Image (cartoon, rainbow, N blue to C red):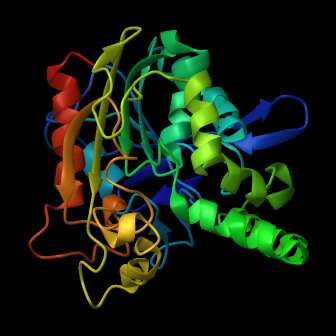
Amino acid sequence: MRKFILGTCLSFACLIGTSYAATAPEQVTSKFQTTYAKTQYPIVFSHGMSGFIRIGTDPLGVDYWYQILPDLARNGANVWASRVSPFNSSEIRGEQLLHQVEEVIALTGSPKVNLIGHSHGGPTIRYVAGVRPELVASMTAIGAPHQGSPVSDFILKIRDTAPILETPIVAVVNLLSKAIIWAQGLDPVSFPHDSLAGANSLSLAGSAIFNQKYPIGVPQNSCSEGLYREQGIYNYSFTGIGTVTNPLDVDSALKITSLLIDGGQENDGLVSRCSAKFGKTIRDDLNWNHLDEVNQVLGLKSVFAPDPVSMYRQHANRLKQQGL
């Protein structure tokens, strides 16, 4: 049993298929200060590509959802952080998440969950809703590339231009994927790693194919809103369009990748404002870059931007008010 900064963490093993065991959700609990974020259904978070739950141990450990989950727990939410392969296809990650959602439901007795996904976590939660919609009360996508990301296409173009680079690059990124799992105290062999499948999933063409299979909440027209409620599931999204939001923050490097997207206009460094459109748009003009959206790195952001921790708390209250 591992300790979070503000509570305890419960870890259970779940078997996905018959090929490997993946780490199941971790619950954050603490003494409620308010019930402001106490939703009817548990909230399950899904991290993005190269993501994790927590790397390192106290006092130097870092949560992916930096300070967000403990704050929600203090305000009454039943919050779970899921762990899937850092690099793999949307379908593989989605199947991993599905088994963890089923476990949360078994453990809590709740018939449904609220899903929140950042970046590649957006398509990941959409897979769960696509195959088991009865288990999902709502989906919220943050900075998620529903229409794909030109950054993935750029990487694949390099591969096509110089095929000799494919094997070494894929090997290096897969090694990084394994290192992320190892840094969480887990066996890297227990997770499948396929960085090329991840890049294909988030390409423009790969995303279009995925959208045809799992269309819930996806806009019918470019840069428009998707359906707010579909198959009984409420859909929301918000995203940033900033890049260099704090000169002291290392994520300012996202300015470089932002130039690959619409000439550097209206994107968070990896995902365009239009690609992030999903369901009901809460905000699509936040002065956040792709890492600010999960309060990284270590909470550094623009002093003129909304506090991510507060924004997630307000969204949990929004779900609560909706009866979710």
What residue is rendered at 41% in x and 8% in y?
Answer: 231
Who's the residue at 42% across and 77% down the image?
Answer: 254
Percent position of residue 189, x then y: 86, 56
Q: In this view, does 75 lie above or below 189?
A: above
Between 256 and 239, the residue placed more toward the observer is: 256
Q: Name the spot of residue 52 as percent of width and height, x first.
A: 57, 58
Q: Can residue 168 be seen in this view?
A: yes
Residue 225 location, x and y as percent?
28, 31
How many numbered discs sit on the rendered protein?
0
Q: Residue furthest bottom?
A: 248
Q: In this view, does 299 lie above or below 41?
A: below
- Residue 288 versus residue 158: which sits nearer the camera? 158
Q: In this view, does 321 lie above or below 70?
A: above
Front residue of 291 and 222: 222
Instruction: Answer left or right for 132 relative to 145.
Output: right
Quarter of the rendering containing residue 216 = top left
Q: At x 43% / y 48%, what residue is drawn? A: 144
On the rendered image, what quadrant is the C terminus found in? top left
- Relative side of 119 to 51, left or right: left
The answer to whether residue 50 of the structure is visible from this angle is no
Instruction: Give the answer, above or below, for where 266 lies relative to 225.
Output: below
In the picture, residue 246 is in which quadrant? Answer: bottom left
Q: Where is residue 263 in the image (x, y as percent from the top left)?
A: 37, 71
